[in-house]
Amino acid sequence: DTGVSQDPRHKITKRGQNVTFRCDPISEHNRLYWYRQTLGQGPEFLTYFQNEAQLEKSRLLSDRFSAERPKGSFSTLEIQRTEQGDSAMYLCASSYGQAFWTRGDTQYFGPGTRLTVL
Amino acid sequence: AQKITQTQPGMFVQEKEAVTLDCTYDTSDPSYGLFWYKQPSSGEMIFLIYQGSYDQQNATEGRYSLNFQKARKSANLVISASQLGDSAMYFCAMREGRETSGSRLTFGEGTQLTVNP
């Protein structure tokens, strides 16, 4: 079984630059989630897709953030004009609702992309 | 108000002993799910165990069990026979609404567990 993968694993950028992260979910999963985790805190929800439709966005997702999931497969998260406050771990998770073997719509996480904004 | 509260920032346990990590939650939704995840220093969130709000029995997965007390709104994780590899950050999380809808997880602040040899 291939789990959730994320690329890159680490990204260092200068303030004001744009960055894009990619997430490949578990192949049969129809739901994809993005979270952000800062040091010493639990993950915070950013946005959620079911297939290609973006169904929910957090207030944390400012205008500088955009996420896509074309064709309902992989997803990208772009941050424009990065700020130092964007430094965090960005986690992607996927799930397959309505399947008996994923009770509770369990979300499985990728390894994360650690972003450092200088 | 905090939806998920983990009151133990750090816990220590001797190898081979059992340990309980506390979690309380707050929701008015009758349908919800409670999850525990483990996050080692490598950073990846690893799913451990799930409890649905309508489940009659406490969930168990190997050495992990969930002490679900619905009236008290608590969902404590019990790890039996602790191993050195159990040293990690542990997060309690909640999904509100029916599982068929898909929904965000709300996480607590975590408990850092250290297993001593």
Image: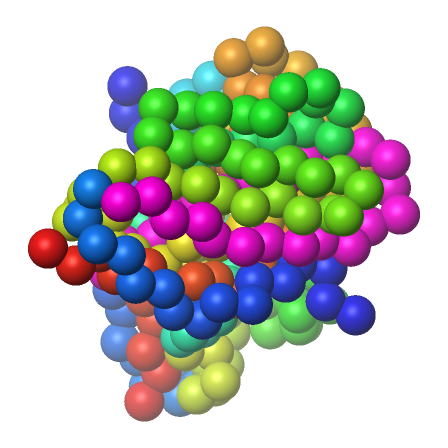
- Residue B87's spot in the image, x, y percent? 24, 55
**Does B99 sit above or below residue A11?**
above
Lateral position of residue B99 relative to residue B79, left or right: right
Residue drawn at (21%, 54%) of the image: B14
**Does A54 sit above or below residue A78?**
above
**Does B57 sit above or below residue A77?**
above
- Count of numbered labels shown in the rendering: 0
Residue drawn at (33%, 37%) of the image: B80
Q: Nearer the viewer, residue A108 or A113?
A: A108
Please indicate, yes or no, whether residue A4 appears anywhere in the rendered image. no
Find the residue positioned furthest to the top.
A100
Lateral position of residue A11 relative to residue A43, left or right: left
Residue drawn at (89%, 47%) of the image: B28
**Does A80 sit above or below residue A84?**
above
* Quarter of the rendering occupied by the C terminus of chain A: bottom left
* Quarter of the rendering occupied by the N terminus of chain A: top left
Find the residue positioned furthest to the left.
B117
Residue B33 is one of the magenta-drawn residues: yes
Residue B36 is one of the magenta-drawn residues: yes
Splitting the image into 4 quarters, where does residue B16 fall?
top left
- Residue A73's spot in the image, x, y percent? 48, 30
Read off the magenta span: B17-41
Splitting the image into 4 quarters, where does residue B82 fall?
top left
- Residue A100's spot in the image, x, y percent? 59, 10
Q: Nearer the viewer, residue A116 or B36?
A: B36
Q: Nearer the viewer, residue B60 or A70?
A: B60
- Residue B27's spot in the image, x, y percent? 82, 50
